């Protein structure tokens, strides 16, 4: 019951944030800026509202919003967990004080389902009716699906941010090693798109990036084991790479990669392959690297902690350096 009570305000805050962003982007901001209407690139006609690259900017807005949720939700849970731990420490030193329970965010699936209800109505209501031109139903649906898929990844680190922030930082550091596979393998299709770059060059970039990512994974993994930190498991590592590449990447482009007075939503081509087979190959290679880099046998999610909850059961230390064992589902 307590988990349900926590889920509602969390979902309400997240939904209001996302819907506020969508209303600003689609109803208030200058479409010629935020979605680059009329943008001219060498060898291409001015961008039309529903041309290929422009159309992808609409659903990429959902990933930008999800990236912001990831940052803010993790930060809020880290802060609340820190405050709860300090109060518990104070209670431990106070005679007769009632011990407070450690803070734990709501189960991410409950939060996501509540958000899905609100955003499943709100995003189409905005994109289908606000400003001009309004989106056709298929693009409005793509915005909704992209946003909800992004939120499924964005909500996952919440519990670790509250309970095990150190392990979450190690997971993020290790996930950086998957970014070359997820972002650079798509370059192999660029020569076929008319770009003046040789196939040899793009293959060198792609394979060099994979090699650098593999070295990074081995190095961070070795350092993590040396420090006695928990192994996150292959699935958690893979999703960390996905979150860094496809949520925080578009958010960083929007906030840092565009001029302050001319912020715009990136096109999908900057992060995803145009050919579905190439994109699936990038995901498969990243997943394979995550499996190779993990410690032990990959485990599946428990009910309480989700996919980020699995770790090895020996040689693990808590935030204060004390040895402990993780029970299944923690």
Image: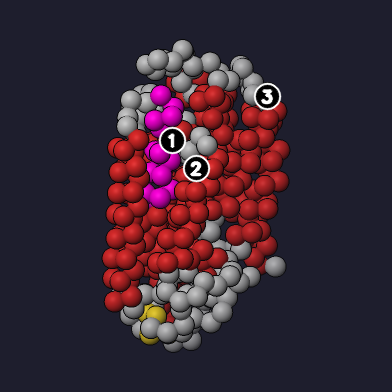
Q: Which mark is residue 189?
A: 1
Q: Locate residue 217, reporting x and y percent.
A: 34, 62
The residues bearing labels 2 and 1 have C-alpha atoms spaced at a distance of 8 Å
Q: Are marks 2 and 3 in contact (CB under 8 Å)?
A: no
Are there few (<14), some (14-19), or many (20+) residues within 10 Å of tag 1?
Answer: some
| Label 3 secondary element | loop
CB of mark 2 within 8 Å of CB of mark 1? Answer: yes
The front one of 186 and 322 is 186
Rendering colour mode: secondary structure
Q: Nearer the viewer, residue 96 or 60?
A: 60
Q: Secondary structure at mark 1?
A: helix
Residue stretch rendered in magenta on the structure? 179-194
Q: Residues within 10 Å of mark 3 (few under 14, many from 20)?
A: few
Q: Quadrant of the C terminus?
A: bottom right
**Residue 182 forms part of the magenta stretch:** yes
Q: Nearer the viewer, mark 2 or mark 3?
A: 2
**Residue in view at x 61 percent, y 63 percent:** 107
Dot 1 or dot 3: first in sequence order is: 3
Q: How far apart, in angstroms, are the residues tagged by discs 1 and 3? A: 29 Å
Q: Which residue is mark 2?
A: 278
The residue mark sitting in front, 1 or 3, is: 1
* Residue at disc 2, secondary structure: helix
Quadrant location, the N terminus: bottom right
Q: Residues within 10 Å of mark 2 (few under 14, many from 20)?
A: some
Query: What label does residue 136 carry, if any?
Result: 3
Q: Residue at x 34, y 59 (%)?
A: 214
Residue farthest to the bottom? 95
Evaluate if marks 1 and 3 touch, with contact meaning CB atoms under 8 Å apart. Answer: no
Q: Position of residue 205 (x, y in %)?
A: 31, 43
Q: CA distance from mark 2 to mark 3?
A: 28 Å
Q: Is residue 247 visible?
A: no
């Amino acid at each position: 019951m307590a988990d349900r009570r926590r889920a509602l305000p969390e979902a309400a805050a997240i939904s209001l944030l996302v819907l506020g962003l969508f209303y600003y982007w689609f109803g208030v901001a200058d479409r010629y800026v935020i979605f680059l209407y009329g943008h001219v690139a060498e060898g291409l006609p001015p961008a039309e509202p529903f041309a290929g690259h422009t159309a992808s900017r609409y659903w990429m807005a959902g990933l930008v919003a999800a990236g912001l949720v990831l940052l803010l939700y993790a930060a809020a849970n880290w802060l609340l967990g820190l405050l709860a731990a300090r109060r518990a420490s104070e209670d431990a030193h106070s005679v007769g004080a009632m011990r407070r329970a450690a803070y734990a965010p709501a189960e991410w699936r409950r939060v996501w389902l509540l958000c899905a209800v609100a955003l499943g109505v709100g995003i189409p209501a905005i994109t289908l009716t606000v400003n001009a031109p309004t989106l056709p139903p298929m693009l409005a649906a793509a915005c909704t699906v992209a946003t909800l898929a992004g939120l499924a990844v964005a909500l996952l680190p919440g519990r670790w941010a509250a309970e095990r922030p150190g392990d979450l930082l190690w997971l993020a550091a290790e996930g950086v090693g998957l970014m070359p596979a997820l972002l650079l393998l798509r370059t192999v299709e660029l020569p076929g798109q008319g770009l003046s770059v040789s196939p040899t060059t793009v293959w060198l970039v792609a394979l060099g990036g994979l090699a650098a990512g593999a070295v990074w994974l081995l190095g961070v993994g070795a350092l993590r084991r040396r420090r006695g930190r928990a192994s996150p498991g292959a699935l958690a590592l893979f999703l960390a790479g996905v979150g860094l590449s496809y949520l925080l990447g578009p958010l960083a482009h929007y906030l840092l990669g565009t001029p302050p007075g001319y912020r715009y939503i990136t096109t999908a081509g900057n992060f995803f392959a145009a050919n579905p087979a190439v994109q699936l190959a990038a995901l498969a290679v990243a997943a394979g690297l995550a499996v190779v880099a993990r410690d032990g046998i990959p485990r599946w999610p428990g009910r309480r902690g989700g996919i980020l909850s699995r770790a090895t059961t020996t040689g693990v230390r808590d935030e204060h350096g004390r040895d402990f064992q993780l029970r299944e589902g923690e």
